[in-house]
Amino acid sequence: MELFHRRYLCLFAFLFLLTAVCATALTGVAKFFALVVLLVLLLLSAAFFIFMKNYRFICAVILCAIAFSFIAMLSSLLFITVPQSKALSYTSDSTAAQIKIVSRENSDDKSSEYVVRIERIGEEELNIKAYLYCDFYSELDYGDRMIGSFQIGEPTGHESDQRDILLVLDAIKDEPIFYKAANSKNFFSLDGVMRICQHVRKLFSDYTDIIFGEASALVKGFLVDDRSDIPVHIQTDFKRSGTTHLLAVSGLHITLLLGSLDIVLRKLRVPKLVRCAVVSVAAIVLLILTNFSGSAVRAVFMLYAVYMSYLFYEDHDTVTSLFVSVFFIILISPFSVYDIGLWMSFAATLGLVTVYVYIDSKLTRPKSDNKLIRLIQKLGLGIVKAVIITLVSNFFLLPIMWLFFGEISLAAIPANLVLSPIVAVFMPLCAIGVLVGAIPVVNIALVFIVEVFEAIILSLVQFFSDIRGAVLSLRYPFVSYLIVIFIIVMSALLVIRLRHKWVICIPPALFLISFCLCLGLFALKMGNELRGESIKDEQMLFYDTASTSSVCDLTDGGYSARSLFFAARNKYATEIENYVIVECSKRDAYSIEYVLSSVYVRKLYLPLSDDPEKLSYATEIYEMAQKYDTDVVFYEGERGIELFERLVLK
């Protein structure tokens, strides 16, 4: 249970990660002074190590600990040159910039989207990861460069889920744009290697489309984290049901895919060393196909750490493997420190390799001589384990969900309990289909089975996502105190040596009881509230309850409307029951998608107008709402604010 007891490498990796996270909050000057202080401490500890022979082991531990922190601070100073706070200073309506394509996100005949690196804004050289929108078709690949004028803004929609995305760029079609192709002929350069990886990924995507047809979208999502063909409303359903991690190639996927391969090799009696080599090569191929996603890289690094322990030690330590894998990811790619997906994966896995391992050791194993009773006992034990895994993971994810999302899905517990075993069967089926799908008769049978599983998965995800009140808000004022206390107590219990290990289960239980009591008292005290928020002459009305809210948008849309909404929306509710737009405008059509992609809007009310221009804007908003599975109601014959009052006061 003790995280750092005789785990010195784990301790060093932890200090590296802690320093890397703290460095993101410092300015460049502060980082420099912190680096100087660490350098002085490093020299002093080296001197103590040389001259204090009686305490050489302790001095060596201190020396290594300071060295790891020094490396983390140096890496942050050299590679993370622009913090998020400073990045927003570059927002502008029209700015000349040079960008480099990192990956293609979504493209069709009318538009293209990319993840890019901003290399230069005006005359200033930068290294900022950003999201690029083009309202025209643009065929670009990894390493290609685009030079021109862009509208630069703050990430507020789905792109804000990636913490290393600091800015959003909109290409200005009327402005001249120049393209520069990457040097893909030099295959040993980074651009050349990534172009090869992108090409392999595209070939796999095309092959999967041929094998599975319409079912290929979900197959690619589960196997290689390619969500480009999955409709937005389906991705939103996964997010609302708390099962998005099933689409992100992580430890679960690596275990299922590479674990299945390892089992086959074991059955063939392949030696351990050869098995490790084959699975390691397969892991690299999987990383290429997933475009080196953070969760996949972490899982593969952890696999390699375990294999290294197999080869050089009699036993291995999973906790150390976890910390070292994340250490290597951030060391190689410093911007990964902003990747929420990486930290969520890390936190959930940490809970499973510490707390769950202890709980699992205390669960009673089936002992009955009757085969039927023993089978029922095994089934019941499997269900109990699945519930405990979900609960432990969610408690360790709680601080991240509170800090970055402000909510947690209660539907995630039953949804993961039901979907995890289905996905555990679905993924190997997809992998088998990819391998033998070219055989005509086998292809028909496999595709049919995959389509059946896909229909079941999508139906269940939609069912759980539509449960009202299933997403619990963490924005209540008392939650911050409860979570801070919970973090401190859990951290202490994980580090110290406990005589009674069951004590580790007390903090989650007390947190749950305290949260329910505080929420009940808060709901009774607050009741319903109607309030207005305004910026200058623009205004929004909010009607709040303890679980939902309704919004009346009196603004004319645009960036100010988005800022107003995110600044003044309900501080407690996690979804919008009714969103009433009083008058459709071009700016509303531009901004509403940011709202729909960031918060669940159940019903959107749009006014009907005799003005053809306003009607066209309403139609455009309607099409956006359909992408996010939001019900749209057109109203006429009454003012929007009257409709709003009738809806909330009925």
Image (cartoon, grey):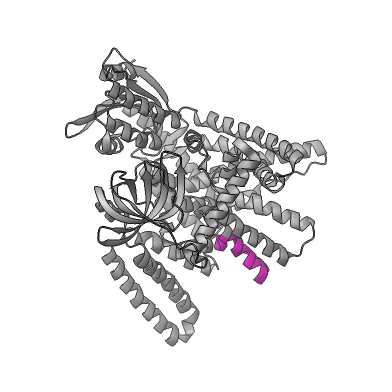
Q: Residue 25: x and y, percent?
A: 32, 58
Q: Quadrant of residue 127?
A: bottom left
Q: Nearer the viewer, residue 409 or 619?
A: 619
The range drawn in magenta is: 301-323
Q: Is residue 540 magenta?
A: no
Seen in the image, is 132 located left or right of residue 326? left
Q: Residue 639: x and y, percent?
A: 26, 17
Q: Residue 176: x and y, percent?
A: 30, 49
Q: Quadrant of residue 615?
A: top left
Q: Is residue 304 above or below residue 615?
A: below
Quadrant in which the C terminus appears: top left
Q: Nearer the viewer, residue 83 or 184?
A: 184
Q: Residue 226: x and y, percent?
A: 53, 46
Q: Nearer the viewer, residue 383 or 190?
A: 190
Q: Is residue 611 visible?
A: yes
Total tally of numbered discs in the picture: 0
Seen in the image, is 13 located left or right of residue 358? left
Seen in the image, is 99 located left or right of residue 583? right
Q: Is residue 303 magenta?
A: yes
Main structural element of the magenta stretch: helix, strand or loop?
helix
Q: Nearer the viewer, residue 161 or 159?
A: 159
| Extreme residue in the top direction | 637
Image point 64% across, 49% down: which residue? 360
Image point 35% across, 35% down: which residue? 595
Quadrant in which the N terminus appears: bottom right
